[in-house]
Structures are given as C-alpha cells and as structure tokens.
Image (cartoon, rainbow, N blue to C red):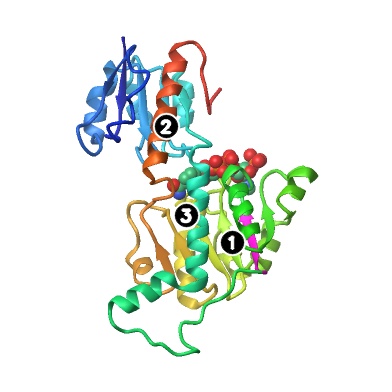
Amino acid sequence: MKRVLVAHALFPESFSAGTNKIEIIKPQKGAFSSEELASLIPTCDAFISMFNTPVPAHLLELGKKLEVISNVGVGYNNIDVDAATRLGITVCNTPDVVTEPTAELTIAFLLDLARGITRSHVIMQQNQERWGVLENIGTSVYGKTLGIVGFGRIGKAVAKRALALGMRIVYYSRTKQAETVQKEYQATYVSLNELMQTADFISLHTPLTPQTHHLIGQKELALCKPTAYLINTARGAVIHEESLIQALQQGAIAGAALDVYEYEPQVPAAMRSLPNVLMVPHIGTATRETRNAMAAMALENVVEYFNGNPLRVVNP
Ligand code: NAP
C-alpha cells in the first residue's frame, strides 16, 4: 500500500475514486504546517502538494521514500524542481482543468476594470453614489486591444472570450504560433514592447520561471498608455510589484486587477490602499468543480505513476 501525503484538506468528494491501493494522509481541516509536512514526508511514497505549498529542497531531502510529487495546480514554481530532479523525484501538475476558470476570472477582471463594477458597488454600500449622466464613466471594451502575454492554454482561452466581446487581440509569447492558430484566434504576434505600447488591456499568462521573473517592470510599465489596464492571473513575481505600485500611484497606467502577488500571501499596504487596483486572494481556480477536478487529476497522476504510466510529468 503506497502512502500518499496530501498537503491540504480538500472537499469530501475529492478523493472518492481510485484510493483502494493507496493510503491517504491528509489534514482534517486546512493545511499541514511545514513542520507537520517535514515529520510526515519521510514515510510517504508520494506527495500531493498545493500550488501554494512551498516544497523546498530541504523538505524533499527528508522524503527518503518519496518517488512522485503531484502538484494541485498547473504552475509549479512552488516546488524546487531542480532539487526534485537531482533526487530522482518525478514532479507532475494539473493542466487543462484550470484553463477555463482562470480565463473566466480574467474576463471578469477585464469587465470590472472597464466598467468599475466593484468600485460602484462599494460606493453604493456606503450610500455615496452619484446618479448623473456624466458620473461613473468607464471605458468600453468593444473595439479595444487586448495584449496577451503568454499565449498558451489560458492565454488562448482568454483570447477566445475577448473575441466574443469584440476585442482586437495582440500577443507576445516565447513561441510564435502557427498561422492557422493565429487565424483561429485572430491574434497578431508582436514584441513585448509593442504590446505594452499599444494594448488597452494587458493580461499575463506565462508561468513563473527565471525567464519570466519581473518580465513586467518599470521599463515595460513606462511604455503603457496612461489609459491602459493590467491584469495578472499568472504569478505575482512576473511583475516587479514595487514598480507596479509606483505606476499606479503616478497614473502611468489607469489601473490593475490582481489575483496573485509577488510575496503572496503578503500584499504591500501601499497596494491595498490604491483606489485603482482590484484585488482578490488567488481565486483563479477557486470553484468547487475545478478544485475537485484538480484533486482528481493530482490523484490520477500518483496512481498512474505507480501503475508504471507516469502522466503530466514536468521534469521528464
Ligand atoms: P501554458 O499552456 O504552458 O502557457 C504558458 C505560455 O507562456 C506558453 O505559451 C509559453 O510559451 C509562454 N511562455 C513561457 N515562458 C515564456 C517567456 N519567457 N516569455 C514569454 N512567454 C513565455 O500554461 P497555462 O496552462 O496557460 O498556465 C499559465 C500560468 O498561469 C501557469 O504557469 C500558472 O502559473 C498560472 N495560473 C494561475 C492560476 C490562478 O489561480 N491565478 C490558475 C492557473 C494557472 P511556449 O508556447 O513557448 O511554451
């Protein structure tokens, strides 16, 4: 019987299938602390971590029996993958099932930034609203340019929705897409600088890697139109957060919507107090359906690994 350590309690229905050959060790509620993980990991064969579970080298080194880590999340920057590879531990993730909910949140952000829905809601709760024809003025999204940085699964799912809103799509990504794909999404490949200069809305969808760390900093933000809005549902450290705060304070861009933060769960007080930022606490995939689908896929990765059929391996 393989022992599988699970970092966080999930919905009761999450591990309902495929558990007869494995023993699951999970907290009753919330997450295991790093001390608890360190004391449990030496006896476990597999580890199901969450996208926000730090998995540093010293934890992996304690996993003397550990063969596979399955991360609940498509992003796996929380794991020291180099250390795992060095120790011969296979790392898997949960792509695809996170694509549509993350794209949904991105579009919700885009419409909210454009029309000030949350801002107006708060003003109404405070009985502070004004009802004039020239009050509460936002911006239309129809006919505007959306710049997508990172044109993978989520970037494309966002493009599909933005097309339905009548937006023009430009993208910057590591790899230029084939003509057929560009045609399908009516998307034009541009340099990052051109994207920053021309987009009315900019949405980030790269993974966090050494190459994308601080991809958007002072220089890139200075290129933006002062009317531009920035959306980040990727990873916080893709943006140099301090530069973003300055850009928002100085009006270099009109506003931002953030699901993720550079030093998550720490959010700078200066960011919290800005009137032109819309913040949520990393809810990109936080729907019950998605959490269950992510958990099922993470478990499938473990089960299939022990069946000799590794799936979704990020360090082959
Ligand atoms: P994906 O399909 O792998 O797409 C990522 C895209 O980024 C690819 O097109 C990739 O280019 C591009 N890219 C990689 N490195 C780059 C670089 N240095 N410069 C420019 N582009 C680069 O991943 P996905 O499923 O769309 O997910 C994207 C990220 O979203 C995840 O890694 C995760 O961190 C984040 N995410 C966040 C949430 C949330 O809750 N907020 C939920 C899900 C995902 P190639 O085509 O060359 O590979």
For badge 3, the amino acid type reads Leu
Q: Earlier in the sequence, mark 1 or mark 2?
A: 2
Tag nearer the camera, 1 or 3 = 3
For residue 71, the mark is 2
Compared to residue 26, the image places residue 241 above or below, namely: below
Q: Secondary structure at mark 3?
A: helix
Where does the image place residue 49, in percent across and percent down from the top left?
36, 32
Q: Is mark 1 within 8 Å of ligand 1?
A: no
Residue at 53 percent of width and 37 percent of height: 96
Q: Is mark 3 within 8 Å of ligand 1?
A: yes
**Is the Cβ of the residue at disc 1 closer than 8 Å to that at disc 2?**
no
The span from disc 1 to disc 3 (Cα, nearest Å) is 14 Å
Dividing the image into four equal quarters, which quarter contains ligand 1? top right
Earlier-in-chain disc, 2 versus 3: 2
Q: Secondary structure at mark 2?
A: strand
Would residue 146 be counted in the magenta stretch? yes
Q: Which mark is residue 25?
A: none
The magenta segment is 143-148
The secondary structure type at the circle numbered 1 is strand
Kindly identify which residue carries mark 3: 105
The span from disc 2 to disc 3 (Cα, nearest Å) is 21 Å
Q: Which residue is mark 1?
A: 202
Residue 128 falls within the magenta-colored stretch: no
Residue at 42% across, 40% down: 290
Report the amino acid beneath label 2: Asn
Cα distance between the residues tagged 1 and 2: 28 Å
* Sooner in the amino-acid sequence: mark 1 or mark 3: 3
Closer to the camera in the image, 151 or 61: 151
| Amino acid type shown at disc 1 | Ile
Residue 230: image location, x then y, percent: 53, 64
> How many other residues sit within 10 Å of disc 1, few (<14), some (14-19) or many (≥20)?
many
Q: Is residue 245 left or right of residue 195?
A: left
